[in-house]
Amino acid sequence: MPIMVGYFSISVAFGFLARNVIGWYAILMSMAVFAGASQFIAIQMLSKGSSGLLVIATTFLVNLRHVLMSSYLATFYRGTNLFRKAIVAFGVTDETFAIASRRFNENKASFEYNVRLNFLCYVSWILGTAAGVFAPSVPQELVEVLPFALVAIFICILVMSVSSKLDAVVAVIAGLLATLLSFLPTGWNIIVATLTACLVGGVAERWR
Amino acid sequence: MIVLGMAVVTYLPRVLPMLKSLDPEFGFLKYIPVAIFASLVFPELLLNEHRVLAVDYETLAGLVALVAAWKSRNLLLTMLAGLAALYVLRNI
């Protein structure tokens, strides 16, 4: 439930910001892309007149991180048929992944659970976008803080995912590395930092 | 066209790892969630728009969200606490 409220409010902000740039195409984008961070980035780039090709390239980089998430989820989907995997894969996002992976780790998830979770988030995302596109104008200072909802949600997910000292160490390494590497094109710092920190975690685990 | 392109490049990283099975020996994969969310959060809090290490309103609101997350373990409460903190900080 909270995750859907999170999706809805963030997508309202997205629709609201996007309508000045691409109008109702914002709704189409939410239906076809369904990836928050890259949609916000795309709106910003388009508003500054970036070429479509550059927007697509950036989207790819930003969303490359889902390779890691899908790889992880795939370890729970061995033996599931291709069609089902293709469906569940469409709904892999930071948030649905966080919940699904936690549930899988506790042996409390299944294909049906994951698809239901993804679908509910997907619907919230589209409805929120539509609400944002057609919403009356609201105080500007309220709109400006809405994107921070995403960060607050990530913080909560992070806190809930840390279950050992090594988890915490991996988190700090990844976080600091991503910060130091932020001069890299958007998205690359996240990929490099994540892979490095994961390898450190994996090696440290064997040492003991 | 742009939307279509974005849709394709978003779907590919999501679906390909599902279709091609991965060696279960990749034990370090379990650190992926923690590492990804840390690398998404830290830069947001530690950098300001000019890409300098800085304590700004986002950093403080992030700390509020961190405490809220710690105490409540609830996504919605954490989100509201973070948003409220940032709103108050920016508008006083």
Image (tube, rainbow, N blue to C red):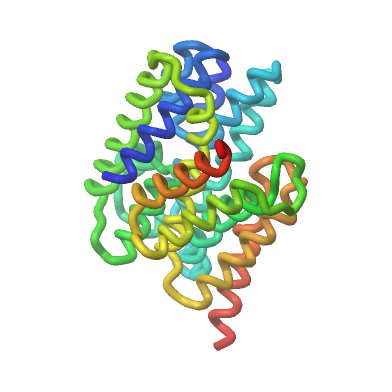
Residue closest to the eye, A181 or A88? A181
Query: Where the N terminus of chain A falls, by quadrant?
Result: top left
Residue closest to the eye, A132 or B27? A132
Which residue is situated farthest in the bottom direction here?
A208
In the picture shown, does residue A122 fall above or below A85?
above
The location of residue B64, given as percent across then percent down, is 49, 55
Residue at 67%, 61% (x, y): give it. A176
Q: Quadrant of residue A24?
A: top left
Which residue is situated farthest in the top direction here?
A23
The location of residue A116, given as percent across then percent down, is 24, 41
Residue at 51%, 60% (x, y): give it. B32
Residue at 69%, 49% (x, y): give it. B47
Residue B56 is left or right of residue A98, and the answer is: right
Q: Quadrant of residue A55?
A: top right
Query: Where the C terminus of chain A falls, by quadrant?
Result: bottom right
In the picture shown, does residue A125 fall above or below A64?
above
The location of residue A2, given as percent across then percent down, is 30, 45
The location of residue A87, given as percent across then percent down, is 33, 37
Which residue is situated farthest in the front direction here?
B92
Q: Is residue A29 visible to us here?
A: no
Residue closest to the eye, A137 or B11? A137
Q: Is residue A51 visible to us here?
A: yes
